Amino acid sequence: MKVRDLAIQGALAAVALVAAYLVWQREPVGAPTDVTVVDSPARALDVVRYEDETRYVELFRDAKDRDQLWVRLGQKPARPVAAPPLADGGTPASSDAGSDVAAAAGSDAGTTVAVAPPAPPPPPRELRANDVAEKLLPKFGPLRAMRALGVMDAKKLEEVGLASTQRKLTLTIAGRQEVFSLATMTGSWGTPYLRRESDGQVFLLGPALLPDLENANTRLVDRRLHVFDLGDFDSVAISSAGATRTFVASGKAPGPVSLAPEEAPDKPDEFARNWHDRVWRLIPLDILGRDEAPPGGEPKESFRVEYRRAGKVVGEVVVARGTEGFFARTEHTSGWARLHSGVDPLVTEAARVTTPVSSAPTP
């Protein structure tokens, strides 16, 4: 009997182990891939647009190159705001001298004064998208949710923040738009409820899908000046004030490259090396959009560094002075990039870097 009992217990234990393994391998209930909201392949997705009360963000494919993604950042027109009621005598209540309030709609006390329409928003800014954006776009095609909640009545929509929200998500798929209302913000993050406007169906999204769109300027914009690295070029040509000097480059990241004058390749120039290292490490404070000019118009070039490999140009950086500081432009940036303060010494020293030692003035 003992042998038989042991055999039965062993068989039951084996069955339990197999069942536990199958349960462990099974997709958990409520996983983010349970419900398909929009069934469309990522390649058919043209634009993902997020908007709230004041701004909008669009992640879209380039019309000429669908493999290239861009981020469009724009502001919505401001809403006109009525002035306070007029006090007795036709003077706006609690207004200061020099007010910009326009003519009143009526002269009686208590009537409302019309104000001038707000200034139009600046043009949207188009910026090159980064690797985070490349990984984000496929999550919307197909778009999946944690669960479907069905059609909700007005009271329930109010409870989840969907009754009067101005936040929206719009997917453009092969020219067709699918529009969703997004729940109003709670705290620092948006509640991941969305309502499909075509049929009123409500879904619960995963918590990590919207924050990248809500913070697109810091999370989705490519802020690199170059896509090549130290060691990917073997010479640099530095130009300043009409003079150009070429250096042989050697070394690779993470250390700075060594620069030696083309006319004396066996004599590294320590001053040029230090100067170039500071130029290479320039960090943009603000990236301007495609075809966007800096304030005050096109800046004036201060110096230029051209990178070459085997005689072919692989990239360049142009540093220019504008009316509001210095800007840089490279082979990779979508436009000009505003630089931090402290670039003046680089401009001054560029003249020394481009002057051969034999031509340098005697101290």
Image (cartoon, rainbow, N blue to C red):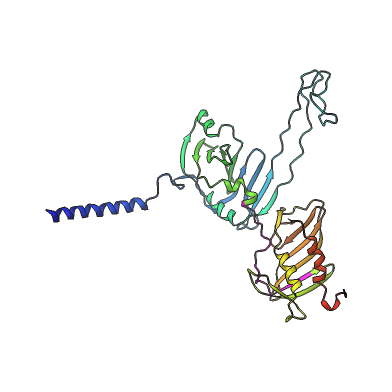
Query: Which residue sits furthest left?
Result: 1
Q: Was residue 236 drawn as part of the magenta stretch in this picture?
A: yes
Q: Foreground: 150 or 190?
A: 190
Main SS, magenta region, reads loop
Q: Which of 274 and 243 lies nearest the eye of the viewer?
A: 274
Quadrant assignment for the C terminus:
bottom right
Q: Residue 273 appears in which quarter of the rendering? A: bottom right
Q: Residue at x 71, y 57 (%)?
A: 284
Report x, y in % for residue 265.
73, 80
Q: Which residues fall within the magenta stretch?
A: 219-238
The location of residue 128, given as percent across then percent down, is 66, 55
Q: Nearer the viewer, residue 266 or 59?
A: 266
Is 307 situated above or below 187?
below
> Looking at the image, can residue 294 be seen?
yes
In the image, residue 28 sits, relative to residue 250, either above or below, namely: above
Residue 350 % position (x, y): 80, 67
Could you say which quadrant of the image residue 310 lies in? bottom right
Q: Is residue 123 left or right of residue 52?
A: right
Q: Is residue 141 left or right of residue 304?
A: left
At 72% from the left and 37% from the top, the residue drawn is 78
